[in-house]
């Protein structure tokens, strides 16, 4: 995982402020948001970042230069790119040009679309046909079809019978591609960028039918706060459901998730994420004897067993002068 793109950003609120260059995906969220805040940019919701320049191997992204975007949109898109293999890179670039994608929402939605076929090498018709067949069948091939389908013939039928668009990235066949609007400017589509201990869904306790915001724990606290703001959620009135976890379920056998606070779940996930496989196995054995019934108890047990991983609790900032706690 490394930098996918660097973006030179000008604040839409302070056009005369010095530009800030940000590397995506973001590595240090606290530092990045601090730099953007200094020029009155980087809001969790507003598209307050004017793209002055982009440095990336993805040529199609040059269409974003001169547009206004949200910093978290750029971060999400970069994470999508970071998971692509070479063939997905080529398909995205070719489809972006052929479909004339120019906006950040379109790029994010295109990153989930696998319909298009891009031919950048005509020398292996079998590979071309196989790739096209997979694109038309949700990225998969049934075992029975693998030996039955003549992929070379599939490629020839495509080349001779369909209209392709010549682009700098190859000949593109959109195959009737229609972008599904998974992202519409607010909630990002579910996407696990890197392994997380807990995948949780948060929604307003007062409205169980409200949209669910996905959180991938552990997360930096500033990212949790921004995700809740993007989801329109009140942190003091959350209903949190644990959807899945990446470690053995035995580790959590004694925990009743009902009533657990998001903050406690995040701290527990952070403690568990710091352990290697051997330490996790040891924690699982001991927890079966201790029977920790809450996220806090399991976190404390992990740090008691492996104090070298313990994280110091952040100091609470005192209220600003003239401001009472009741006014916060």
Image (tube, grey):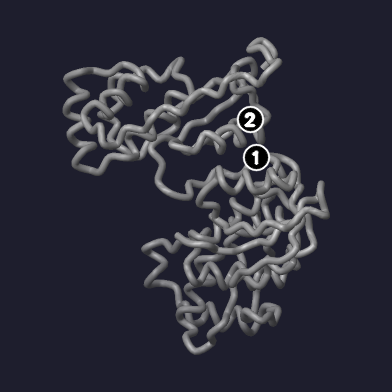
Name which residue lies at 65% across and 32% down. Answer: 229
Q: Residue 180 placed where, x, y %? A: 67, 51
Residue 26 image position (x, y, % from top left): 55, 52
Q: Is residue 305 above or below residue 205?
A: below
In the picture, which quadrant includes the N terminus? bottom left
Residue sticking out furthest to the top: 326
**Dot 2 and dot 1 residues touching (CB under 8 Å):** yes
Callout 1: few (<14), some (14-19), or many (20+) C-alpha neighbours within 10 Å?
some
Left or right: 183 in relation to 28 = right
65 left or right of 235 in image: right
| First reached walking from the N terminus: tag 2 or tag 1 | 1
Label ID, residue 187: 1
In-front residue for pair 260/226: 226
Residue 294: image location, x then y, percent: 35, 18
In front of the other: label 2 or label 1?
1
Q: Nearer the viewer, residue 311 or 112?
A: 311
Which SS class for mark 1? Answer: loop
What residue is rendered at 62% in x and 57% in y? 22
Tag 2: Cα neighbours inside 10 Å, few (<14), some, or many (≥20)?
A: some
Residue 211 disc label: 2
Position of residue 103 in the picture relative to residue 248 (left or right) = right
In the rendered image, residue 246, in percent from the top left (x then y), is placed at 35, 40
């Amino acid at each position: 995982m490394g930098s996918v793109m660097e973006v030179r950003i000008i604040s839409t609120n302070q056009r005369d402020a010095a530009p800030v260059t940000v590397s995506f995906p973001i590595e240090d969220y606290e530092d990045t948001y601090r730099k953007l805040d200094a020029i009155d940019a980087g809001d969790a919701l507003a598209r307050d970042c004017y793209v002055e320049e982009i440095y990336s191997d993805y040529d199609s992204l040059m269409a974003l230069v001169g547009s206004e975007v949200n910093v978290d949109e750029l971060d999400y898109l970069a994470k999508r790119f970071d998971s692509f293999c070479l063939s997905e890179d080529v398909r995205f670039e070719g489809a972006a040009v052929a479909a004339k994608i120019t906006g950040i929402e379109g790029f994010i939605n295109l990153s989930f679309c696998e319909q298009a076929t891009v031919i950048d090498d005509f020398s292996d018709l079998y590979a071309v046909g196989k790739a096209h067949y997979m694109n038309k069948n949700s990225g998969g091939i049934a075992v029975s079809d693998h030996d039955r389908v003549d992929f070379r013939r599939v490629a020839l039928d495509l080349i001779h019978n369909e209209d392709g668009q010549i682009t700098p990235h190859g000949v593109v066949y959109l195959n009737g591609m229609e972008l599904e609007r998974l992202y519409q400017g607010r909630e990002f589509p579910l996407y696990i960028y890197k392994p997380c201990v807990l995948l949780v869904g948060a929604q307003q306790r007062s409205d169980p039918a409200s949209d669910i915001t996905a959180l991938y724990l552990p997360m930096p606290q500033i990212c949790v706060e921004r995700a809740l703001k993007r989801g329109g959620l009140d942190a003091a009135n959350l209903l949190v459901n644990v959807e899945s976890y990446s470690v053995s379920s035995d580790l959590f056998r004694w925990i009743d998730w009902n009533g657990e606070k998001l903050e406690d779940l995040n701290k527990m996930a952070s403690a568990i994420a710091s352990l290697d496989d051997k330490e996790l196995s040891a924690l699982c054995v001991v927890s079966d004897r201790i029977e920790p019934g809450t996220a806090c108890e399991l976190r404390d047990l992990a740090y008691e067993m492996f104090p070298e991983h313990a994280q110091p609790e952040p100091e609470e900032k005192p209220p600003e002068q003239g401001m009472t706690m009741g006014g916060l």
